Amino acid sequence: MANDTSRVDENIALRIDSEHAGLIGDAAGEADSKLEDAIALCLSGGGYRAMIFHVGTLWRLNDAGVLAQLSRVSCVSGGSITGAVLALSWPKLAAGAFSRAAFIQHVVTPLRRMAATNVDAESILIGMILPGVTVGDMVAREYRKVLFGNATLQSLPDSPRFIFNATNVQSGSLVRFSKPYIWDWRVGKVSSPRTELAVAVGASSAFPPVLSPVTLKFKESDFEPNSGRGLQRPPFTTRMVLTDGGVYDNLALETALKRCRTLLVSDAGGQMQADGDPAENWASHSKRVLDLVDNQVRSLRKRQLLDAFTSTDADHRRAGAFWSVRSDIANYGLSDAFPAPFERTQELARIPTRLDALPDTLQERLINWGYAITDAAIRKHWDPAIAKPADLPYPGAGI
């Protein structure tokens, strides 16, 4: 694949000094942190908006023959739902030679079924009423019922490596859920975990305040000796209190940046809007502050990514592409890009960050938009030799 130093669209056209880039990320990284000539895909958070937008991303990458080349898929929040379905379906996709028919059957269909399911409102209500049942329990139940059954992290393929990211409220660090381990670098590593996939994805997508926290219980003996730095002791090793991975890293960039030279980053996160008269009651004000924190985390991650894409240091430089649900496709300057009127795409970008059922027509437009902007990004900034597809997944729906 071709390398290009101008592979980021105007949405992240701010440079960050390399000395500041080191402030973002775990101090310890992964044990096997050697950089590889490999392709990583990062799927951001954003509720059902992200889950379905990323379907379009995966569809375009599969049509381009790129999906089968992935070495790592790092996911957070709504992106974790999409990534987990892809992970469970990977053997079937491989058996079907990653055909479009196999992709639709095993990835698109179950995720669209999930997108037609109301989760958050009912989960919040029952979690508030029933004793001994949390909102996180209810969300995991819906994931289990609609998508994952009793699959565990050990049901994931060995390759590519799938990682579902959550945030540890106790340690303030990222928690990685994967087949080889669950790991918070400060608390320690649990090898070969049997945690249910529905629970891991539930923790990754437990966006605050309504779906958070998710609490996991462990035994001290579950952790590898001396695998944590400073916090490998109770209560950190016996009770892990988790919230949405997007609180720490909404682009799911951390575990991919440290390992792979090529980064494909799909961002379906929300964007904070200016408000000249913000509410002053404690609930609305608290939400506004949370939105501000989220916006800053996202901005810092994008700057970190830009620094990696434009670095003059060969050891630090990354190839790849970034695209966003909020991008303007005209900025890519492709004469044959799919028509995607900015006012129409911004309607899709403003879909609320919820796990609330989406109408079929809205799902199809979101998938088409994810497909179209992914196509523009990878052909413009990564590999111009990739052929433009004949049409969108749902031609009748448009964007």
Image (cartoon, rainbow, N blue to C red):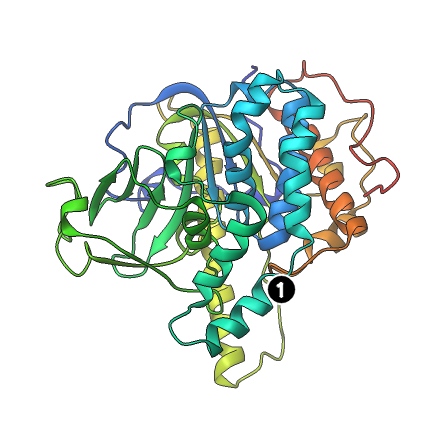
Q: Can residue 379 be seen?
A: no
Towards the viewer: 219 or 346: 219
Q: Residue 333's spot in the image, x, y percent? A: 74, 30
Q: Is residue 380 rendered to the left or right of residue 341?
A: left
Residue drawn where x is 34% and y is 43% of the image: 176
Where is 188 relative to 67, above or below? below
Residue drawn where x is 35% and y is 34% of the image: 179
Q: Residue 211's spot in the image, x, y percent? A: 48, 65
Q: Is residue 189 rendered to the left or right of residue 109?
A: left
Q: Is residue 211 rendered to the left or right of residue 154?
A: right
Q: Residue 178's spot in the image, x, y percent? A: 36, 37
- Spot the residue most to the bottom: 281
Instruction: Identify the residue position indicated by label 1 in the image.
Output: 273
Pointer 1 local density, CA inside 10 Å: few below 14, some 14–19, many at least 20: few
- Spot the residue most to the right: 396
Q: Can residue 227 be seen?
A: yes
Towards the viewer: 71 or 145: 145
Where is 20 relative to 347, above or below? above
Residue drawn where x is 72% and y is 41% of the image: 367
**Circle 1: element type:** loop
Q: Residue 240's spot in the image, x, y percent? A: 27, 57
Which quadrant of the structure image shows residue 275? bottom right
Point out the image quarter for the C terminus.
Answer: top right
Point out the image quarter for the N terminus.
Answer: top right
Which quadrant of the structure image shows residue 214? bottom left
- Amino acid, disc 1: Gln
